[in-house]
Structures are given as C-alpha cells and as structure tokens.
Image (tube, rainbow, N blue to C red):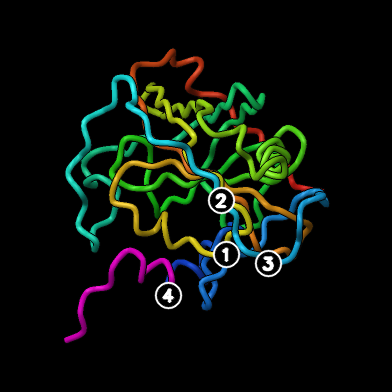
Amino acid sequence: MPAPMTLADRIRTRLAPAVLTAAGVTLLAAGLLSYLDPVPASGSAGVSPSPVVTATPAPSPSVRPSPPPASPSASPAPSASVERATATRVVIPALRIDLPVMEGPDTYPPCDVAMYIRQLGQPGEPAATYLYAHARTGMFLPLLTESERRNGARMLGMLVQVYTSDDRLHLYEITEVLRHQTTLDRPLAAREEQLWLQTSEGPKGTIPKLQVVAMPLSSGPADPAEAHPTPEPVACG
C-alpha cells in the first residue's frame, strides 16, 4: 500500500495543475515558479546567481512563544470544527504598501489586491503564510524597486503588518530579500511561523521571482474596521 502523500507532494502533483497554475504562483513539474504579470520592470529578466540579503539576528520584542512543530505530513489548517482565520490586509508602512488580501483565485491573478495560497499557512500557524501581488503601482511594485537597490538591503528590519479575519494584527520584521528565485521549496518546508511576500522581476513570461521573508514579532487585537477592508479586484490590463 503506497505511503500517504505529504502536503508538499499534494501541492506538486495535484494542486499545482488544477489550482495554483491559474493563481500564478505554482510549482511547475521542474520546481519552477510560474508567471505573475507585472508592468515591464527594469530588473533583470534572466536567471542569474541569486543574491540573498539577510538581517543580523537580534532579540525580538514580545516574541510569541514558538508553537510545537507540525508534522511534515500535516496540513497547516486547523481542524474542520474551527473556522480558520485568514489574512485580510497587508501593510508595509515604510514602502506605503496597503492592500486588502483575498484567497488566490483559480483564474489569472487580479490587480489591486494581494492574494494568499490557501494550501499553505496563515498568520499564527506553524507554517509559511505566502502573499503575492503584481509588481504594479499601488501593489507590490515598491518591493521590486527596493530590491534593485543594493539587493534590497534597506528593506531589512522593515515592519510588515498583516491583519486577519479574526480581528487580530500580526507584526513581522523583514529578515531576508531573495532575488531571482525559482522555487517554493523553503516556504513549503517551513515548520514555524513565517511570512513570505512574492512579486515579479520582469514582464509576463519571466520565471525568476522576488521573495521577501519576514519573521513574527508579536500579535494582538485589531480594530475590526481596520482588519476588514473590502477587496475590489480588477482584471489586469
């Protein structure tokens, strides 16, 4: 009798062709990221050695105790009897990014929103929360712009705020800027709370992506009005 499939196996072999391909952040058969169409950018469109800029580890104020590690074969989602809290808004004050967040659709990703991969984690869970948006004005373009200046060194230490549907605010600190990335291996393998942000580095058809990693600092109650912006996705022209 074959062994049970792990979460990573299910994403690679079942979910990728049906769900994540249309969402624009799939793992292809060769482990490559798919396309997320931005406005043509000045960044390199070809694959080159991947610069990785990381922050020096420092004690984090009011760090939440680490949850017990999840089993490699377990889904990050809580039990079916508990409604799962999901990301509703992402804010990076230093970059003037403020976007409502919605579940990634089964069609080409829309504009004017950020999206999450349902099959991965959510804030507060022992897994990677993966948010992505187009590299366009009013979306994640500032991430791409900053990444092209000294490999994004200025972003290290920036605060990221993620609101969730249970009226909570989760604070993260950017610790890594990963340029020219072609896999989702690290977020798939995460067994602790992390936040990953993705956007494109070139025009439609460009495979390498920009990934920004942030680690949790704290969480607390949020004003419901601030936690529930109304997503107004539009088709990207």
Say the numbered circle drawn on residue 182: 1
Q: Are marks 4 and 1 in contact (CB under 8 Å)?
A: no
Q: Residues within 10 Å of mark 4 (few under 14, many from 20)?
A: some
**Above-or-below relation of 90 to 12:** above
Q: Tag 2: Cα neighbours inside 10 Å, few (<14), some, or many (≥20)?
A: some
Sequence order check, earlier mark of 3 and 2:
3
Q: Residues within 10 Å of mark 3 (few under 14, many from 20)?
A: some
Report the residue marked by disc 4.
Answer: 13
* SS at mark 3 in the image: loop
> Can residue 167 be spotted in the picture?
yes
Which residue was labeled with disc 3? 47
x 38%, y 35%: residue: 57
Distance from Cα at disc 1 to Cα at disc 2: 10 Å
**29 versus 25 height, above or below:** below
Q: Are marks 3 and 4 in contact (CB under 8 Å)?
A: no
Residue at image position (73%, 66%) is: 46
Q: Which mark is residue 148?
A: none
Q: CA distance from mark 3 to mark 2?
A: 13 Å
- Which x, y percent locates residue 224? 44, 16
The answer to which of marks 4 and 2 sits earlier in the sequence is 4
User: Are the residues at dot 3 and dot 1 in contact (C-beta closer than 8 Å)?
Assistant: yes
Q: Residues within 10 Å of mark 1 (few under 14, many from 20)?
A: many
Q: CA distance from mark 4 to mark 2?
A: 26 Å
Mark 4 near mark 2, Cβ–Cβ under 8 Å? no
Q: Is residue 232 left or right of residue 186?
A: right
Residue 188 on image: x %, y %: 39, 58
User: Nearest the camera: 110 or 92?
Assistant: 92
Residue 233, visible in the rendered structure: no
Residue 70 belongs to the span the image colors magenta? no
Q: Position of residue 19 (x, y in %)?
A: 51, 63
Instruction: Identify the image quadrant of residue 187.
Output: bottom left
